[in-house]
Image (tube, grey):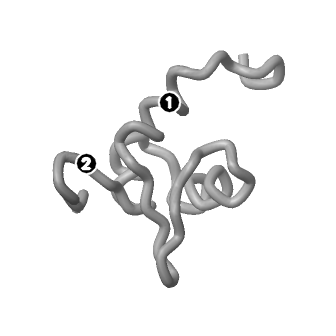
Amino acid sequence: MPIQIGERTFYTVEDVSEITGWHPQTVRDLLGDGRLKGKKQGKRWYVSERNLQLYFDEEPQENEA
């Protein structure tokens, strides 16, 4: 379940997985190598709604097209 802090929305790995249909490990891999921006607090990753949008707004790399 996304969390709200002020007007900002943050998603957990599980939330991003449900939204995108990706396996949770895929989300963790994207976060771990920096392709998807997020913050790790304790053992949990959080991705802002904006960073999720930015990921999809980026131009695909040659090997992703």
Residue flagged by tag 2: what amino acid is it? Arg
State the separation of the CA atoms marked 2 and 1. 15 Å
Q: Position of residue 57 (x, y in %)?
A: 52, 21
Q: Is residue 41 above or below residue 8?
A: below
| Residue at image point 49% right, 67% down | 45
Residue under label 2, please give it.
Answer: 8
What is the secondary structure assignment of the residue under circle 1? Answer: helix
Residue flagged by tag 1: what amino acid is it? Leu
| Residue at image point 47% right, 75% down | 44
Quadrant housing the C terminus: top right
| Residue at image point 59% right, 45% down | 36
Say which of 15 and 59 sits in front.
59
Closest to the camera, between mark 2 and mark 1, is: 2
Residue under label 1, please give it.
Answer: 54
Q: Is residue 38 above or below residue 56?
A: below
Say which of 56 and 8 sits in front.
8
Pointer 1: residues within 10 angstroms few (<14), some, or many (20+)? few
Mark with earlier residue (2, 1): 2
Describe residue 26's horizontal placement relative to residue 21 as left or right: right
What is the secondary structure assignment of the residue under circle 2? Answer: strand
Q: Position of residue 54 (x, y in %)?
A: 50, 30
Say which of 17 and 59 sits in front.
59
Q: Position of residue 31 (x, y in %)?
A: 62, 55
Which of the 4 image quadrants contains residue 4?
A: bottom left
Disc tally is 2
Describe residue 16's horizontal placement relative to residue 37 as left or right: left
Describe residue 35's horizontal placement relative to residue 24 as left or right: right
